[in-house]
Image (spheres, rainbow, N blue to C red):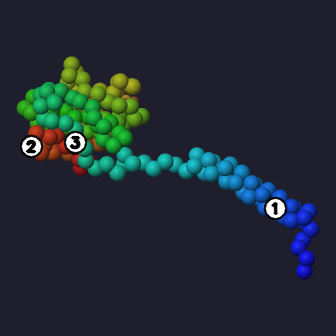
Amino acid sequence: MADPAPSESRRKTLKLLLGSGATALGAAIVYPIIAYLKPPEVTGEQVTSVLVGKVDDFAPGSGSLFRFGNKPGILLRFPNGSFKAFSATCTHLDCTVQYREDMGLIWCACHNGKYDLNGKNIDGPPPRPLDPFEVVVKGDEVHVTKS
Ligand code: FES
């Protein structure tokens, strides 16, 4: 049997090149769309404990924000030296709360929401208390864990 004519061989090669080019083009268009639509992994939810700092980093009668994964937390140190910690995400519309020494409470600047130093919502629109964390002091280190 004779070899195919040169023009037929070129036609097959051209079809092969066009076919693989079309496949590569389709993948180049579809992959970014799928990558865009797929939600990112939420790694912050996996965090169960963080080292916030040394005991001496926190003055008695103070409040400090810290990162708990990808969320803010608030650590309070009371005048007697004890600690409490809460999620610093306001239960109203997710603004970050802050410690207000002058008011003696935890305050949300977004809509004037107020929490007492036990994290209980006491005034303004927040519908429920702040989520509590557990504070564990190991030697001179302050660790916060989800309770
Ligand atoms: S978001 Fe905090 S009071 Fe509205």
Sooner in the amino-acid sequence: mark 3 or mark 1: 1
Q: How far from the left and from the top, in percent, is residue 98?
A: 29, 28
Q: Distance of mark 2 from mark 1, alpha carbons?
A: 73 Å
Q: Residues within 10 Å of mark 3 (few under 14, many from 20)?
A: some
The residue that label 2 is drawn on is 139
Could you say which is closer to the camera, residue 8 or residue 30? Answer: 8
Q: Amino acid at mark 3?
A: Leu
From where the camera sits, is residue 129 visible? no
- Vertical side of 14 occupied by 79: above or below: above
> Could you tell me which secondary element the residue under label 3 belongs to?
strand
The residue that label 3 is drawn on is 51
The residue that label 1 is drawn on is 13
Could you say which is closer to the camera, residue 83 or residue 104? Answer: 83
Q: How far from the left and from the top, in percent, is residue 72?
A: 32, 36
Q: Amino acid at mark 2?
A: Gly
Q: Distance of mark 2 from mark 3, alpha carbons?
A: 12 Å
Q: Amino acid at mark 1?
A: Thr
